[in-house]
Image (tube, grey):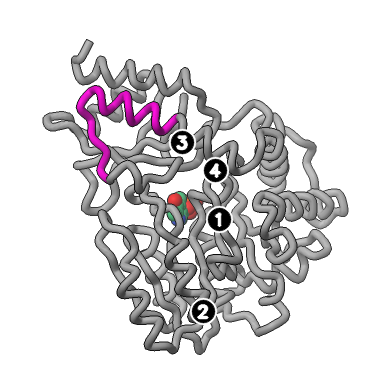
Amino acid sequence: MKLLNPGPVTLTARVRAALAAPDVCHREPEFAALTRGVIAKLGRVYPEAEATHTAVLLTGSGTGAVEAMLGSLTPRDGRTLVVSNGVYGERAAAMLAAQGKAFDIVKGAWTEGLDLAAARSRLAAGGYTHVFSVHHETTTGRLNDVASLGAICKQRGVPLLLDAVSSFGGEAIAFDAWNLEACAATANKCLHGVPGVAFVLARRGVFSARPSGATSVYLDLFRYEKEQRAGFSPFTQATHVMHALDAALSELSDAGGVSARSAHYRALSDAVRAGLGALGVEPLLDPATHSATLTSYKLPPGLAYATLHDTLKEQGFVIYAGQGDFSGSIFRIAVMGDLARADADRLLGCVRRILGAG
Ligand SMILES: *Cc1c(COP(=O)(O)O)cnc(C)c1O
């Protein structure tokens, strides 16, 4: 089975084998050494950030990391500007609301880019302690123009918090130019690990510069950061999943790092887009705005999502439905995980047969 949903991904044999590592107690030195090794490797995924940012590891999914980042790093008496154009921006606003933190939202249409003009004028008015946005908005597959948003943040001196859950490891991130205080991500999207470990890569200085803003005991990054300097964690870590992440990070490095992985994704996405285009299946967005990792397509007239999904699943592929307003009108294809050009070609052959094009 090849997973074409945006995480969890199809595992490589090397990552799967790492799951069979010996049982280990999370309070023993060998697990602390593994944890410190994973933190070091995460710090090197983007060499630019190695000296300035540190990874804080949590047991949970990407949403947990985003919630921990927002909860811990936005001050209780702060105010955050959420710049949103999809499900994940709106989810972050819901988290701030649940935390009882003040925020405003620049809520853009899901089919449009970030509303930079509105963000610029809000920030010019002042009063914000943080800006939050989503790097790759997986709702549509748009790679948001975080470079422009980050430049505004830098100019205004407001730190940016980024949901990089579906881009970390697969797209370029400019930590300094974007004024990035922290980004949240997970083991099981572009890093090709197993679900169960998520993390926040945060500017080292924030943990000593101010108190934690956390409104939750479990999701307080400050507590994790302090204990993880020695490799330990306040609560049980997903020990086997950590071994798998360690292997996945070595594999990413051996494969040439983020730029090589991004180019591999881009080649696969381009091949799928060209093949589907030849069958008359159109992307939802202007292809120039798409991420390397995921493309949304309009469902061809007369073809129900369930029919497409179920028939492809019988052939060994899992595709992904649209969310919210897009359910029933689009489908999504992600190319993260252990996928090769031959898989893309076989997928195209299956879709051709489903569409009756021979
Ligand atoms: C997948 C995703 C999430 C949520 O991750 P989970 O692991 O499902 O909790 C958050 N943000 C973005 C942009 C995502 O693609």
Mark 2: give few (<14), some (14-19) or many (20+) Cα within 10 Å. many
Q: Position of residue 198 (x, y in %)?
A: 59, 54
Earlier residue among tags 2 and 1: 2
* Relative depth, front residue between 165 and 175: 175
Given the image, on which type of amino acid does mark 2 rest?
Val
Residue 73 lies in quadrant? bottom right
**Marks 1 and 3, how far apart at CA:** 16 Å
Q: Is residue 52 above or below residue 270?
A: below
* Residue at left offset 49%, top offset 81%: 156
The residue under label 4 is: 190
Question: Mark 4: is the Cβ under 8 angstroms from ligand 1?
Answer: no
Q: Quadrant of the C terminus?
A: top left
| Label 2 close to label 4 by CB (< 8 Å) | no
Given the image, on which type of amino acid does mark 3 rest?
Arg
Given the image, on which type of amino acid does mark 1 rest?
Ile
**Marks 2 and 1, how far apart at CA:** 18 Å
| Label 1 close to label 3 by CB (< 8 Å) | no
Q: Tell me if residue 25 can be seen.
A: no
Point out the stretch of residues depicted in magenta.
Answer: 268-285
Q: Position of residue 261 (x, y in %)?
A: 57, 37
The residue under label 2 is: 158
The residue under label 1 is: 173
Earlier residue among tags 1 and 3: 1
Residue 266: which disc?
A: 3
